[in-house]
Amino acid sequence: MFAGAAAFLASLLKAFVTGGIICAFGQVVMDFTRPTVTPGHVLVGYVTAGALLSALGLYQPLVELGGAGATIPLSGFGHSLAQGAISGARSAGLLGAFGGGVQATAAGIVAAVVFGYIMAVIFNPRG
Amino acid sequence: MLQAAKKLGKQTFKFDNPPVIVSYASIVGPMEGQGPFGKEFDYVLEDDLFGEKTWEKAESKMLRETLKLAVQKASTSPAEVDFLLAGDLLNQIVTSNFAARALGIPFLGLYGACSTMAEALALGAMLVDGGFAERVVLGTSSHHNTSERQFRYPTEQGVQRPLWAQWTVTGAGAVLLAREGKGPAVTRATVGKVLDLGVKDANDMGSAMAPAAADSLLCYFQDTGEEPEDYDLIVTGDLGSLGLKVARELLVRGGLAVGENFTDCGVLVYYPEQDVHAGGSGCGCSAVMLCGPILKRMEAGNYRRILLVGTGALMSPLTVQQGESIPALAHVVAIEKKGEG
């Protein structure tokens, strides 16, 4: 029981530190490159970097170490895209490479659409 | 070269019968109300929506009410005012257009970004001194949240501001200029040239505008033959702490030693503890500081002669995205108390 709780807390800590380091890196990049690098660049850059690292096999170890700390940041989305494209290519060839990425990330994309829609219905935009 | 009768030197104009600021009014947002001059504005909004559904509506209402208040304070009515001059920061100057819709005064819309208050004062004084108007009401406004979403990011996104960024003032200021009456008068104005030294950071408008402010001030003193010591206050619109430093250095290099009397509305309008970083900005910044604390001090006799240097950064969100640098403009307006020496 106690050992289970300790392992749980340890995984939380690992996720927190991994996710924190990934986000802090983006912050530092923006702080030292203003005004050239905008939040938009970081957003797109993280997805692309996540996909590239994933294709090279470098992102999966990070996910194994940090769990949600590595999958929740946008680089994790890039990782899912790349892994989906790779497995799609293996099973269905070239077309699978195009479709696989979206298949792998479909749950996330649909969740974003559904929850975005619900929020838009309930709340009024302010900004 | 032919020189116009009311022109002094290269870019300065002198008013033979200086139009009088017979009344002035200002309304500010909650944050400006908590600033060092919070008690010196006519009205402090409880919240920045001002009872409206959108910030844009709130800004327009704020400008409209400020203009109305200036007209009321002069014991006149909109029907007796010959021109309304107004401008703001939103696309197609909608804040001013919508305020003008409710006022029924012949309207000339202006855009000089944050220099608009000084532009309006110069043009209003020309209209009155030129014999085209007995009374001109003029005003400008800005609103933090309408500016954020137009010029920067949606506010919900919570994008961090760098330390050199300025905070757009929520506020509106208005002045009623008349040919005759009691109050300080607009005696001279220098219309500035658009300068661009290549600053591309839309968060660093102070540095972008400082050269224009220095250029117009140097021109004013050259054209008039006066010295900075002749003025109790030389106040720029919204250079912020960084831009003020740059402007001071440029003035010294240009051979003009400005002293303690040289400051900036953006530096004055908030307390440093209010965490706005480099200070205030926006059309409302110089408008509320002029139409509140500064004109009140002239009325009280603390200041006799002042120079307002309206500073404007003339970019649009699109030009920033396309990587263009920021053109900047500054107009100088001299306001003096008549009589008593």
Image (cartoon, rainbow, N blue to C red):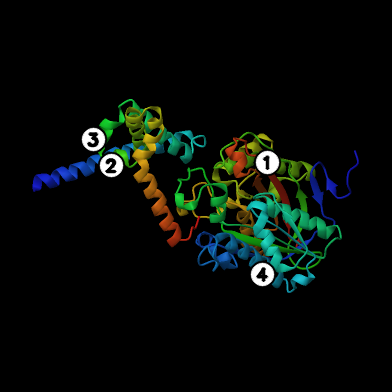
> Could you tell me the amino acid type at mark 4?
Leu
**Numbered disc 3: what chain?**
A
Co-location on one chain, circles 1 and 2:
no
Which numbered dot is residue A65?
3
Do callouts 2 and 4 mark residues in contact (Cβ within 8 Å)? Answer: no
- Calculate the distance from the C-alpha at mark 1 to the C-alpha at mark 4: 32 Å
Query: Which residue is label 1 attached to?
Result: B212
Query: Taking B230 as reference, is B7 left or right?
Result: right
Co-location on one chain, circles 3 and 2:
yes
Residue drawn 36% across and 45% down?
Answer: A108
Query: Which residue is label 4 attached to?
Result: B69
Query: Which residue is label 2 attached to?
Result: A68
* Quadrant assignment for the C terminus of chain B: bottom right
Q: Secondary structure at mark 1?
A: helix
Q: Nearer the viewer, mark 1 or mark 3?
A: 3
Q: Position of residue A23 (x, y in %)?
A: 36, 39
